Amino acid sequence: MKYRELGNTGLRISEIGLGCEGFGEKECQGASLLLEEAERQGVNYFDLYTPDPQVRAAVGEALKGRREKFYIQSHLCSVWKDGQYKRSRKMEEVRAGWEESLRLLQTDYLDVGMIHYVDSLKDWQEVAEGPVLAYARELKERGVLRHIGLSSHNPQAALAAVQSGAIEVLMFSVNPCYDLQPASEDVEALWDEKNYQRQLVNMDPERQELYEACQRLGVGITVMKAFGGGDLLDEKLSPAGKALTVPQCIHYALTRPAVASVLAGAHSVEELRASLAYETATEEERDYALAFASFPKIRWEGHCMYCSHCAPCPQKIDVASVTKFLNLAKAQKEMPETVREHYALLPHHAGECIRCGACEARCPFQVPIMENMRQAAERFGM
């Protein structure tokens, strides 16, 4: 298992994490089965959005003797009422849900507390200016919550939260279909078939801006819906008109800026193992670029996907990394010092490009790589 820094939190987490969908399987035996397999394979991060008290209690039992081996990403404002899950901004419900979570999980702290399901700018403003964010900060001051996060499907709301400096971790839906959709307050629009009737071209600019802002500001991203609820794995259901594999979906998410971990949904140990097989997959098995280039309903043109098909460079330039730093620099009026420092640490720089064109000949997306190298050399001075 490989591990990544979760933004600026100081947490080093497994690049494959665990979603909680399967914890309630087999009368909640899934919690112990999945956590045992996760521990065995080096997974040290999982999400627990569900407020179902039976599931939380089962996870608490499964964590006995291994609490310190996992970082728990839990959720504020995800509550259980009248036998049903609901999102709430009522503080009496939010407080009760948080306290019950600690009690049932049999722990006196949680590592990351997500302000749950903020999918509109209005909701973010109410959270930020009202008692919810204040309560999250109070929990952090008391030491029962280590880091404040937020979950969202809307890049506009998520970007506002990230730019506010109030959150340290963003849980966001990342996959090659959702990334082409414009911002919406209706989460169902992401998988609504009618929104894929016209051919979509290139990543939505607000999503690109969000990922780059997270990278620049040190906000770590944990990924939900990497498989689109399983639709991307089925050609009949895939909005792209063609199926992808599990390793391709995971690799796409992990190559986005600021992404630290893909939270793989798994209803069984076998499904979890299928995701964890990414760690031993070959480059060919992970490669998503050629599949994307053949999508009948979606296409990328002139937009770097960080797929590294341009490699190898005869000058040994890491073209994908140079392009990623160039995009981060372009997003700001002034060069962020952290971006300049990270670029300087690359063993080879854009100024070494000899304009042989081999990279452009290999690129599946017709990216003007030589022009990008010229711009990077000019901006970074090397």
Image (cartoon, grey):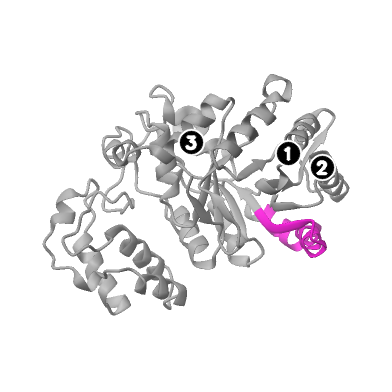
Q: Which residues are magenta?
A: 122-149
Name the amino acid type tagged 1.
Answer: Leu
Name the mark on residue 300: none
Name the mark on residue 106: 2
Q: Residue furthest top?
A: 26
Judged from the image, the secondary structure of the residue bearing numbered disc 2 is loop
Q: Earlier in the sequence, mark 1 or mark 2?
A: 1
Q: Earlier in the sequence, mark 3 or mark 2?
A: 2
Name the amino acid type tagged 2.
Answer: Gln
* Residue 70 visible, this orientation: no
**Residue 107 in the figure: left or right of residue 123:** right
Exactly how many numbered labels are in the figure? 3
Badges 1 and 2: C-beta atoms under 8 Å apart? yes
Mark 3 highlights which residue?
276
**Residue 118 in the figure: left or right of residue 196:** right
Q: CA distance from mark 1 to mark 2?
A: 8 Å
Mark 1 highlights which residue?
63
Query: Is 63 covered by the magenta stretch?
Result: no
